[in-house]
Image (spheres, rainbow, N blue to C red):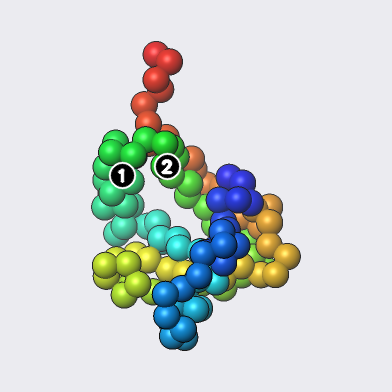
């Protein structure tokens, strides 16, 4: 995981189409999804499918925990086609990936060298 993996839309020089509070706030957040017994199978299938049609987009699925003072998380299922597992992560001002604990890195693309 790299700091660049956790850039929000504003940090990627994107701007919202409207000036609504939800959209402006959403552009300051980083989309994440909760990984648990209820969500893991559906999310793994989703990301394996996405990697299959766009292999350069996402190569790995990172399962991580937020350490103390990483930031805040808000449940936002309505923002992504009603994905009940979707959350916005609002990073603390001095956030770095050191504030995440990597639990598991799941490869989405089979080893192409084999």
Determine the CA span between mark 2 and mark 1: 8 Å
Report if residue 48 is visible in the image: no
Residue in the image at 60% along x and 50% along y: 4
Q: Label 1: which residue?
A: 50
Displayed quadrant of residue 78: bottom left
> From the viewer's perspective, is 92 left or right of 81?
right
Vertical arrangement, residue 21 with respect to residue 43, above or below: below
Numbered circle sitting on residue 58: 2
Displayed quadrant of residue 68: bottom right
Q: Secondary structure at mark 2?
A: loop
Report if residue 36 is visible in the image: yes
Q: Nearer the viewer, residue 37 or 23?
A: 23
Q: Secondary structure at mark 1?
A: helix
> From the viewer's perspective, is 48 left or right of 90?
left
Q: Callout 2: 10 Å neighbours few (<14), some, many (20+)?
A: some
Provide residue 55's location: percent of width, then percent of height. Answer: 37, 35
Q: Nearer the viewer, residue 101 or 49?
A: 49
């Amino acid at each position: 995981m790299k700091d660049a993996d956790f850039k929000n839309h504003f940090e990627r020089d994107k701007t919202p189409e409207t000036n609504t509070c939800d959209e402006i706030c959403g552009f300051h957040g980083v989309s994440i999804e909760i990984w648990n017994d209820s969500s893991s199978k559906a999310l793994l299938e989703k990301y394996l499918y996405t990697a299959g049609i766009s292999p350069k987009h996402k190569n790995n699925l990172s399962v991580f925990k937020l350490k103390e003072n990483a930031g805040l998380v808000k449940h936002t299922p309505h923002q992504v086609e009603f994905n009940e597992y979707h959350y916005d992560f609002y990073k603390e001002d001095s956030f770095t990936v050191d504030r995440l604990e990597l639990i598991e890195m799941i490869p989405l693309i089979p080893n192409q060298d084999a």
